[in-house]
Image (cartoon, rainbow, N blue to C red):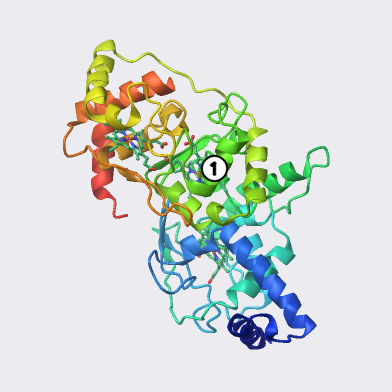
Amino acid sequence: MRSGLVIAIAMIMLCGSAVVVDAADVQDFAAVERGHYLADAADCGSCHTVPGSNHPFSGGRPIETPFGILVAPNITSDRETGIGDWTDDEFDAAVRGGRSRNGARLYPAMPFPYYSRMSRQDVMDIRAYLDTIQPVRHAVQVNRLPFPLNLRISMIAWDALYFKPEEFHPDTSKSNDWNRGAYLTLGPGHCGACHTPKTFLGGDKPSDALRGYTLQGWTAPGITSGKGPLADWSIADIEVYLRTGHNRYAAAAGLMSEVVKLSTSKMTNDDVKAIATYLKDTSGPAAQSSAPDKNVVSAGAAIYQDLCAACHRRDGKGVPGLFPDLAETATVKTRDPTTVLRVILQGAQSVSTGPEPTGPAMPGFGWQLNDAQIAAVATYVRDHFGKAPPVSESDARKARSDEAARTD
Ligand code: HEC
Ligand code: HEC
Ligand code: HEC
């Protein structure tokens, strides 16, 4: 039946609407379309594909976790090395239940706690789509964690503590838009995987949902509204950011530029608006500040005028759509300086999407400024534009050595 479906799709692509297909295949085609859309929204391809490879979903991409490296497996329909032989129940148990085929527990680097908010139908549609992808024979050795974390048995405790599988249930007191946005944000979009603070075991802290977290050398800032970092962003500002990777305030770097490119830029305008509607209804705390050293701030201000103001302007407002407004980006306001330091040290290339193929770039200054100067300009930018706490010389030194140790 599956190969029949593939042939039907190939024929539809070849012959346009002239082909007569039977009702079951038309239904399957709709399922494949829905599954394709959901797989993008859930960003399955990003982890399960080696960047730049011609073999989508064939696995092999290393995923950095707080415990060590895991490698995403092959989820093409190859029977030996992929999921071709799996039953629908087994596939569903993996995606929503965090169980591999033999019942072993998966590590939460696979975001199943979020995916458990999808319905079984959603997961079956994703499978229908994966079945149309060319099967690739590629055996992946997933687990490169140190002992005892390499023992999947250690996940029993994790699941008991942090995994509460629950399908999304709409809140009838809210609008349809809000509910659609909540489903996408908390479910397939797994925004909290990066944006929600974690316990030392890597489980979400639900009371701090979406209030910001640092992973893989990037700060995913808080994306709450209320008094939180998105307080001044309108629904339209969030929409433009998720569709294009930048807006009048900010530009997506690093991990988020990949999320925009592979996932949110492929969502419908209605869905992106729904996410924005939901985020604008969240509440979060305002960033707190502690006063930095005046001499450091004035040294930082001088470096800023010299090296940064040409693009970001003296007032930090930048140029809408080109150079981010440093006073409005959560990256600058957030307590954790990881991303600000990383961007100043190595520069940043903004995302390019279909409608906007060339994104503006920022040069790195790591070769030009010493640790004290990096700390000073980061302190100035954070204090002046973000009311965020100062950055020390040792923070800068650490960021530089973390940077040198990275391979991505
Ligand atoms: C953030 C990275 C990430 C994303 C996004 C992701 N996965 Fe995974 N996935 C992994 C990793 C890592 C594993 C291996 C976990 C383990 O072995 O404990 C995995 C395991 C799996 C498995 C089990 C395969 C096996 O051989 O045991 C399936 C099936 C799967 N993913 C499907 C999906 C689907 C479908 C999506 C999108 C809805 C998705 N994944 C999104 C990282 C990811
Ligand atoms: C793989 C990790 C990851 C995932 C998943 C992710 N984000 Fe992000 N996000 C980031 C990082 C890192 C940044 C900071 C980017 C920067 O510094 O330019 C960010 C920035 C943002 C910003 C801009 C904040 C600002 O003030 O600059 C918004 C809005 C946002 N993300 C929304 C979302 C939404 C909505 C989702 C889910 C659909 C999502 N993110 C999923 C990592 C992630
Ligand atoms: C040639 C123009 C240019 C110069 C000079 C420049 N920047 Fe940038 N800056 C950019 C662009 C473009 C981005 C957005 C890149 C992206 O999308 O990731 C950016 C991003 C940033 C961000 C992250 C903002 C966000 O939304 O996450 C910070 C912080 C920053 N710059 C600070 C500085 C500092 C400090 C200096 C001087 C040491 C500087 N920039 C010099 C163009 C520039």
Quadrant of ligand 3 in image: top left
Q: Position of residue 207 (x, y in %)?
A: 63, 34
Decide if residue 177 is on the left or right side of residue 258: right
Instruction: Name the residue tied to disc 1.
Output: 240
Q: Residue at x 47, y 61 (%)?
A: 47
> Residue 26 sits in which quadrant?
bottom right
Visible residue check, residue 191? yes
Seen from the viewer's position, the closer of residues 228 and 364 is: 364
Answer above or below: position of 40 versus 130: above
Whether residue 66 is visible: no
Ligand 2 is within 8 Å of the C-beta of the residue at disc 1: no
| Label 1: element kind | helix
At x 60%, y 30%, the residue is 225
* x and y percentages locating residue 89 in the rendered image: 70, 72
In this rendering, the count of numbered labels is: 1
Q: Residue at x 45, y 82 (%)?
A: 137
Tell me where residue 129 appears, x and y as whole percent: 62, 72
What amino acid type is highlighted by mark number 1?
Answer: Val
Where is residue 294? Give x, y as percent.
Answer: 28, 11
Quarter holding the C terminus? bottom left
Picture quadrant of residue 360: top left
Quadrant location of residue 224? Answer: top right
Placement of 23 over or under 166, stated as above or below: below
**Mark 1 neighbour class, 10 Å CA radius: few under 14, some 14 to 19, many 20 or more:** many
Given the current orientation, which residue lies at the most extreme top position? 294
Q: Is residue 176 left or right of residue 327?
A: right
Quadrant placement of the N terminus: bottom right
Q: Nearer the viewer, residue 337 or 19?
A: 19
